[in-house]
Image: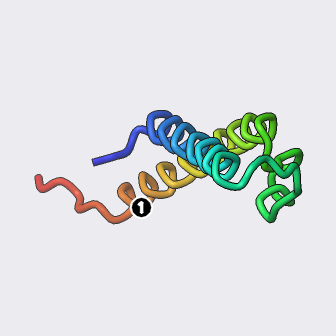
Amino acid sequence: MKLNVKALALTLGILWGLSVFILTWWIILFEGATGEITLIGKVYRGFCISPTGSLIGFLWGFFDGLIAGALVAWVYNWFVDRFSPSPVQ
């Protein structure tokens, strides 16, 4: 069975983007918006613990997950093609 590359890419993009967004708001609610650049802010340019940073993090996370999902599905499908048994004739 092959994976749908577009579906997996979109799914992982949405999940990763929402994860970064929700985590940012979780930190804002319990510790307050600091505006400080974090470790993830060094990878995702423009991200910081702030409402605007949560939107920037969502966008970066979405595209990061989109690319990762597409690569995972593509590599999985490639292995399925290479290692699936040939049909019996």
Out of 48 and 11, give the one closest to the viewer. 48
Mark 1 crowd level (few <14, some 14–19, many ≥20, 10 Å Cα): few
Q: Which residue is mark 1?
A: 79
Out of 33 and 9, give the one closest to the viewer. 33
Secondary structure at numbered mark 1: helix
Residue 55 against residue 45 in the figure, above or below: above
Residue 49 against residue 86 in the figure, above or below: above
Res 13 quadrant in image: top right
Q: Which residue lies at the image location 79% right of the left edge and 47% below the top edge?
A: 33
Out of 35 and 66, give the one closest to the viewer. 35
| Amino acid type, callout 1 | Phe
In the rendered structure, the answer to whether residue 61 lies left or right of residue 72 reads right
Image coordinates of residue 65 in percent, x first then y, are 60, 47
Q: Which residue lies at the image location 18% right of the left edge and 53% below the top edge?
A: 87
Task: Count all numbered tags in the image, as a single digit.
Answer: 1
Image coordinates of residue 22 in percent, x first then y, are 59, 44
Out of 8 and 56, give the one closest to the viewer. 56
Q: Which residue lies at the image location 75% right of the left edge and 49% below the top edge?
A: 32
In the rendered structure, the answer to whether residue 57 lies left or right of residue 75 reads right
Image coordinates of residue 40 in percent, x first then y, are 77, 59
Image coordinates of residue 24 in percent, x first then y, are 67, 48
Q: How is the image coloured?
A: rainbow
